[in-house]
Image (cartoon, helix red, strand yellow):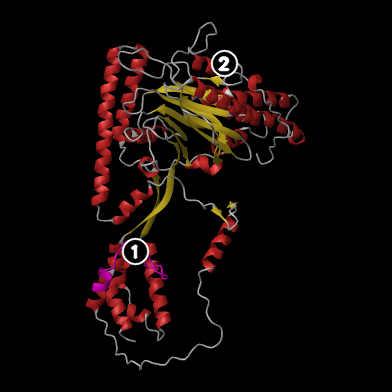
Amino acid sequence: MAGFGWQHCCVRRDRRNWPAGLALREILTYLMVLRMQIWRQEQEAHLECVEGVKTRILTLNFKVGIRAIMARRNELQPIEEVTEEVNSTARHPLENVYNEVSKMVENGPKFDEIGVYSNVASLMAKYNDLCALVQQDKPDIILLAETWLTSSIPDGMVSLNGYTLFRRDRIGSKGGGVCIYLADEVLSTFHVSNIPTKTPGTESLFLKLSNKDTTLLLGCIYRPPSSVVDNDKILVESLSHLADSYATLLLFGDFNMPDITWPIDPRCSYKPSSQLFVDLLTHSHLRQLVTQPTRHRLNQNPSTLDLIVCSDDHSLTNLDYLAPIGISDHSTLKIDLQICQSPPRRTVSFTRTVTDYRAVNNDLAKTNWEALLSDESIVKNWSTFKNTLQSLLHRHTKSYFVKHSSTKPWINGRLLQQINRKRALWRTYKRSGSELDYRIHREFSNRLSTAIKEARCVYEKNVAEAKDAKKLYKYIRTKFTGPVSTPRLKNTFGEVLDNNKIIADTFADAFSNVFTIEPSGCLPKLNNICKPISFSDISFTTDVVHKKLKQLKVSKSPGPDLITAKTLHECADTLSEVLCFRYSAY
């Protein structure tokens, strides 16, 4: 597939010409298979097959592409039947070609990002339930309205491991507020910048995500029910300006306009503020995707308050209405965002080693140290001792790969089962619409929220009471709001620096300004010279060496010799005699 190029593939911007229902990821496979046909024509001179087989191969190539797409969607595998038919007639089988295409689709650029939006009505109160949602669905982008955060609540109180938090709090009064969590994989692919927008009376947060391939504007809005018409006019004008400025606009939020029917009915009359929003959608290329009620409360009619507005409906697919977060009365909206980025890493893989110190001690006891350490040079003897010890450690050490999840550790399998049960109850209520099913879901949701809080308290108590302080510091690091990166600095002229080399030079210049300048010339003479001190021989005993080795902290890092403190501690019984024997001779 290295020779495959895109110069022969023309992609129209108007994707309405594509077959209905094909996602952008599937279109990639479709294009690659079409390119395969051209490659087959270029290799015609190298195909030594009977007359008429070429046409058959090209036809089957097209079948391979279409059936591969349908197999991926329907979880079937009819592709093997087609490739077997081609392999029986062509000298060059298509199976390897299809495998390469599949590998490029799976491991190459990722198009479907999972986005989750909800009105949480107090993020602090629903934080544990949000962690459970992240554990379950692992979204790439999380947008929340009515966070109720204030300046007295630091980011670390509501941080999610593996995500960076962007927030816009209400100023001057309680309630309101919006925030956006972006996964580290998104930040590693896109440059993110905050776009300030004037929306008085409405909390709004707009983030510009850009790289060399695409640019989009991601927004989250909370418009309170008490918003006045004058403020709504400014909001609509701002949205219209942003829609004209950016080719791709993805907007999520609670607009509190329950009088609007979706899809829009032009025969209906709306309130002045709602009419402004309807006119915006009617006279622009923006589209609103939510068509079902998103707020459910006992003794009240369900209403559609939470909306998703976009400039390109192809960029958002598979909208799903999930159960509320915690005991909120707003549905959770889950949707796929068609933006290209590298595949995310849901887990962190690392190598863990396990050493059988009992076997190491047995081999150390059998070693003839007197013969090995017979050289007069202490340097050579130390090198022999170190190499022998490391060889024995390597012989009795096994390595295996471990995958560490970046999610919240207190969300165990039992809680995940209860989360699935909660979603099943929500689906039951959505199908029936009965008040009894809603009560059952609500009561179960309350019990689940309590169980998640208790699980977190138990976990944090165990961390706080653990003897190993590293567990506490490790948990504290998970409260950081984002990945560590090179900070942006201002130079002496007030200019913001974004080049890493210039930033490093700026740090070096700042540090050099506080260095002590040593005088040139000869060193001054000392007036009071200390009298020479005579040292007596140091006595090494097995008990002293053994005691010192046992007092080593096994969690400490090794020195330049790369012999760990745990090795010296575990092998103290045999190593104490060796070290005492050798160093007593000098």
Give x and y (percent) for residue 350.
42, 51
In this rendering, position of residue 237 left or right of residue 410: right
Viewer can see residue 330 = yes
Q: Residue 279 carries which label?
A: 2
* Quarter residue 434 falls in: top left
Give x and y (percent) for residue 278.
54, 15
Q: Which mark is residue 215?
A: none
Q: Which of marks 2 and 1 is nearer the N terminus?
A: 2
Please state, as top left, top right, bottom left or bottom right, where the N terminus lies in the image.
top right
| Dot 2 and dot 1 residues touching (CB under 8 Å) | no
Viewer can see residue 84 = no
In this rendering, position of residue 504 left or right of residue 460: right
Q: Give the range drawn in magenta.
A: 547-563
Mark 2 neighbour class, 10 Å CA radius: few under 14, some 14 to 19, many 20 or more: few
Please state, as top left, top right, bottom left or bottom right, where the C terminus lies in the image.
bottom left
- Find the residue positioned furthest to the top: 267
* Quarter residue 362 falls in: bottom left
Q: Circle 1 — which element?
A: loop
Give me the residue at 35% from left, 94% from top.
531
